[in-house]
Image (cartoon, helix red, strand yellow):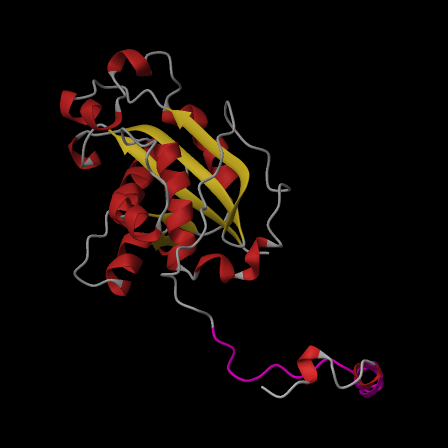
Amino acid sequence: MTREIVLDTETTGFDPARGDRMVEVACLELVNRLPTGAYFHRYIDPERSVPAEAAAVHGLTDEKLRGQPKFREIAQDFLDFIGEDPLIIHNAAFDMKFLSHELALANKPTLPYARAVDTLAMARTRFPGAPATLDALCRRFGVDNSGRKLHGALIDCELLAGVYLELTGGRQIGFGLDAGPKGRKAAGAGNPAAGALPANGEAAALRRPGPRPALLTSGEAAAHEAFVRSLGEGARWRRPS
């Protein structure tokens, strides 16, 4: 079983070194590349005002964030949810610098960048020169993002889960048979549907390096041949093509 965490944040701006802070964080649990339904989601009091240009992107104003917990109050719950598992992030450098800043302010251990799997870098490697925004990748892979009117950490995690599945080979990987609802209990109110959607055929096919050996025993093969002979020469699959 492979557990990974899709992660996204929303912030007041672009640079924590200039005083910008996180206003939302969301994490979505994947097992064998598929969402289990377990997630962590919090809105955060940034302890500063939200600039109008940032609010226009994610819709989180000072009024909407009033009364929400400060990051230091939810930091341990966040760390408990992500555990030691890889973090799937679109444009990982941005989110990781904010997470490191917030965790340091909360006197918590910061996250090594090596834990991040950057889907932006993956997309640029796979489709050089093509648009690699989350919206562009949703269009490429047929992931339905019609409900995304504004940026939001949780909905972006759901969309990224679908994109990540396609970037790593689509539903052919294990066919999701090992993923199930037994992940960690969801944290936060509500439980919106996760966003891994069917492949549209653009994902790279997985090829077996050689023919798979026959699993039929000699006795089973003989019994099958005897059954076919009993059907006579008129059997459709015995006719010459």
Q: Is residue 148 above or below residue 125?
A: above
Count of numbered badges drawn on the protein: 0
Instruction: Choose top left, top right, bottom left or bottom right for residue 150.
Output: top left
Q: Viewer-proximal residue, 166 or 115?
A: 166
- Part of the protein shown in magenta: 207-227
Identify the image quadrant of the C terminus: bottom right
The residue positioned 39% from the left and 60% from the top of the image is: 201
The residue positioned 18% from the left and 36% from the top of the image is: 14
Percent position of residue 114, x then y: 36, 56
The residue positioned 32% from the left and 41% from the top of the image is: 100
226 part of magenta stretch = yes
Task: Give the side of residue 119 with respect to residue 161, left or right.
Answer: left
Extreme-front residue of the structure: 234
Q: Viewer-proximal residue, 213 or 222?
A: 222
Percent position of residue 122, x then y: 31, 59
Percent position of residue 35, x then y: 51, 44
Q: Is residue 91 above or below residue 216?
A: above
Residue 218 shows in this picture: yes
